Image: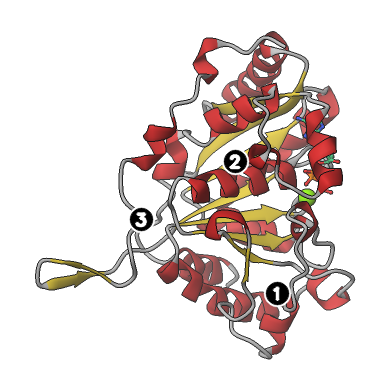
Amino acid sequence: MMVSDSFMWDFTKLRKTPRPRWPFAQGEETVSKRAGVVCVASGKGGVGKSFIASNLACLRAAAGERVCLVDFDAGLANAHLLFGLAPKHDLGSVLDGTVTAEEALIEGPHGLHLLSGGVGRARLANPTRRELGRLFTALRALEETHDLVVVDHGAGLGYAVIAHLAAAKSFLLVTNPEVTALSDAYAVFKRAQAVNAGVRVGVVINRAEDEEVAKEAYERLAAVSRRFLGRDLELAGWVETDPEVPRSVRARQPLILGSGESSAVAGIKALASWEGLESSNPGESFYDRARAALR
Ligand SMILES: Nc1ncnc2c1ncn2[C@@H]1O[C@H](COP(=O)(O)OP(=O)(O)OP(=O)(O)O)[C@@H](O)[C@H]1O
Ligand SMILES: [Mg+2]
């Protein structure tokens, strides 16, 4: 399948800075650095958030960053399955106070850390405001020990998603080219605007037949946003429909770890260079902002 030139991958782009150690010294002083936090959200379910979040996290870890993937599809988590991991702890154990967020992490490929969301935990599927506040307080530690935190969300506009979007400097909005998915993506963008007017949104068109279909879908979404919200939308990237994706899910190994250079791999690699990922550090603590958004 043809892949446009813009998807030619230069791995060195992600290697501009050596992996920093925490706490790291600059001359005499110790400089505190917080992770950038990038949320991966969608309106419609099943559009490819977990596939994109897990491969993106893996790719950035492969480039030497300390990456943590938080599976916030709480109660219905499946990111661990995409890595073939069996975590002992999850967000539920963190909420219970059984373990700290750091203790709940499990190590994946390239030293990537995963905080699983837990499966079948009703309390996590519908956390109260107080429970979410407790989780955000616990997750704050992850910002201090990683360079990038990628948050994989459940579909739609649950309370936890809105609190994350309110705190985000930037987030990835995943959609398919179908009108139903685009319409739901618009609803998420509109809500994000309402709670966080300055947020930078990168649209990802996943499962596109080709570049033309992806660009057309993006244009439709962008036109509606310009017309009704007076806001431009960025295209962060697009990923082709690729039979290697379900194959990688079955194999429980992230696609980008395979040896093949399929079209979806090219799309994910281009997405990993989206500028919004670099500006995702909110300066102040992301999780402090998320907690404040609950009030
Ligand atoms: N580019 C692609 N090409 C082919 N299949 C894909 C592609 N992206 C995702 N898929 C398939 O779509 C299915 C759903 O993907 P995924 O679980 O990542 O969606 P999701 O948005 O996280 O879903 P949910 O809303 O349930 O969390 C997966 O089984 C995956 O194999
Ligand atoms: Mg998912």
Say which amino acid is labelled 1.
Leu
Q: Is residue 235 above or below residue 258?
A: above
The quarter of the rendered structure image containing the C terminus is bottom right
> Which residue is depicted at the point 75% across and 60% down?
80
Dot 2 or dot 3: first in sequence order is 3
As drawn, the residue found furthest toward the left would be: 28
Q: Which residue is mark 3?
A: 19
> Which residue is depicted at the point 68% across and 8% down?
212
Could you tell me how far apart the alpha carbons at marks 1 and 2 are, in whole angstroms?
A: 22 Å
Say which amino acid is labelled 2.
Leu
Res. 244 mark: none
Q: Which residue is mark 2?
A: 172
> Which residue is depicted at the point 60% across and 70% down?
294
Q: Secondary structure at mark 1?
A: helix
* Dots 2, 3 in contact, CB < 8 A: no
Q: Nearer the viewer, residue 50 or 19?
A: 19
Q: Which residue is mark 1?
A: 91
Q: Secondary structure at mark 3?
A: loop
Say which quarter of the image contains residue 31.
bottom left
Could you tell me how far apart the alpha carbons at marks 3 and 1 are, in whole angstroms?
A: 27 Å
The yes-or-no answer for disc 1 within 8 Å of ligand 2 is: no
> Which residue is depicted at the point 59% across and 84% down?
100
Residue 66 located left or right of residue 257: left
Q: Nearer the viewer, residue 81 or 182?
A: 81
